[in-house]
Image (cartoon, rainbow, N blue to C red):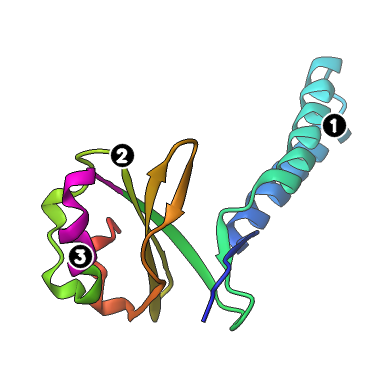
Amino acid sequence: MENKFIRVRSVADILVVVSIIAFGLLLAILSYSESVNTIGIFLMAVGVFLFFVLKSSYKNPENGHLYKKEIINFAKQDRNFIINGLSDPSHFDVTLRDKGDALLLTIYYNRKEAYMQLYEYKPYTYRPCTKLYHYNRKDINRLINK
């Protein structure tokens, strides 16, 4: 099973964009001064720009669920410990996190489930070195900072 996660807009992203555009429109419509109108037009332009670039959630096309993404870096010498921890996340050693940047653990999670995969740095790119693991969210709660 190969899961490709794609970036999508979350509800929070849409609310931010709509509120910036609405505030900019309000300032542009009010005729206090030209500077206030200019700020309003600028805010509307920023809102339109953010509409195209602000995507903070990830979607799994296979099941249609939305996920958040967490990235944890590890040192290369901890590779075997990390791979063993992926097979059983209850024994995962969280003290190894953020000690280097040769290994990258990506975690896609929502309220119910999580997917984890380990990547290894090869020159100019990170390449997968494990399969994609699927867990219940409660099994990996201690890995996520939230």
Residue at left 65%, top 47%? Answer: 54
Q: Main secondary structure of the magenta part?
A: helix
Residue 91 on image: x %, y %: 11, 71
Quarter of the image for residue 135 reads bottom left
Helix, strand or loop at mark 1: helix
Comes first in the chain, label 2 or label 1: 1
Question: Which residue occupies the foreground of this view, 78 or 99?
Answer: 78
Residue 130 on image: x %, y %: 36, 66
How far apart are the two marked residues, 2 and 3, measured between alpha carbons?
20 Å
Residue 19 on image: x %, y %: 69, 48
Q: Which residue is mark 1?
A: 28
Residue type of the residue flagged with mark 3 = Arg
Q: Which mark is residue 142?
A: 3
Q: Which residue is mark 2?
A: 101
Residue type of the residue flagged with mark 2 = Asp
Extent of the magenta region: 73-84
Residue at left 80%, top 36%? Answer: 44
Asked if residue 40 is among those painted magenta in the image, a careful observer would answer no
Helix, strand or loop at mark 2: loop
- Circle 3 residues within 10 Å: few <14, some 14–19, many ≥20: some
Residue type of the residue flagged with mark 1 = Ala
Q: Nearer the viewer, mark 2 or mark 3?
A: 2
